[in-house]
Image (cartoon, helix red, strand yellow):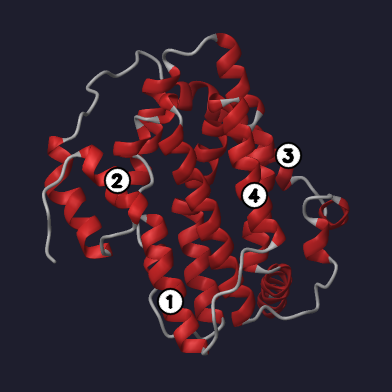
Amino acid sequence: MGAINVGLKEYQIMKRMRIFTKEQVDAFHDISRKDWPVSTYVPEQSFVESEMHPVMARIELEEDKLTEEDRKSDPVLAPFYDDVDRQLTREDFLQSLVDLKHVYEAYDSVIDNYEMLAPLQATGPMTRWAYLEEDIDALTELMGVDAPEPSEVGAGYGDEIKSIAARSQPGVLGHLYNFYKEWDMGGRTVIKSTAARLNIPRNFKLARRDGDSWNIAATLDVIADKWTPEQKEECLTELSRANQLASQLVTLLHGTEMEEEEDEEGEEEGGEDK
């Protein structure tokens, strides 16, 4: 079954039914996007750049100031520091991919279910679950195991996203933007480095750049242009929690011991220079 020229509605139906291949998803992006409704309206001021980015920068600055003891005492990060001497394994990596897929699907679900988020159906994250399915299938075949169920972290993250969306669509958009900014940019590097460290002979498709993710900010600006000040505040208020949830997945995937080893390598190099 080759490439098919479909409209947005047909794409959404097929996406939910999971009846096409990754190659067909790429084909939809190439030949069908021109038939989909695309907004040409550009707000005079970008909500993402003028209001979200300053808040996110402040949150990241506060996080950078945390000491190791602060991180260990943080209720969000503490569970990952309980056994810092345990080496990251392929099983950990597989579990992280399963959790990540669960979160992507949660975002995909809320985008489909709420009218305010509808513009993201055409310009948002529509291929990442397909990449993850292929990566997970390849890794389980390599390891000779079945894919596990989502962990408490992954399942909790997905459930929280759906809960937030039910009470505040602006709020869940804060989470969505933070998540995709984190994983489409920094996450690709983390996946590549972790796979290399675990000697996994595969170029993970999730580590590839996804052009759709770069459209999220522009689409979010169009959506936010109609918001009241209260709705904008709902979005900004969620950014701190969004960063905490993303930190959980990053720590689970990257491993706390990796950070320690990197620090040790830096000290050794510094010692040799002296």
Q: Which residue is mark 4?
A: 157
Q: Which residue is mark 2?
A: 13
Q: Which residue is mark 1?
A: 137
Comes first in the chain, label 4 or label 3? 3
Q: Which residue is mark 3?
A: 62
Q: Percent from the top left, x then y, of residue 235?
A: 58, 25
The local crowd at label 4, few if under 14, some if 14 to 19, many if 20 or more residues have their Cα within 10 Å, is many
Contact flag, marks 4 and 3 (Cβ < 8 Å): no
Q: Percent from the top left, x then y, of residue 211?
A: 30, 48
The amino acid beneath tag 1 is Asp
Q: Is residue 144 above or below residue 217?
A: below
Which mark's residue is nearer the viewer, 2 or 3?
2
- Alpha carbon separation for disc pair 2 and 4: 25 Å
Which mark's residue is nearer the viewer, 3 or 1?
1
- Alpha carbon separation for disc pair 1 and 4: 22 Å
The local crowd at label 1, few if under 14, some if 14 to 19, many if 20 or more residues have their Cα within 10 Å, is some
Q: Is residue 111 above or below residue 99?
A: above
Comes first in the chain, label 2 or label 1? 2
Q: Percent from the top left, x then y, of residue 43?
A: 34, 16
- Alpha carbon separation for disc pair 4 and 3: 22 Å
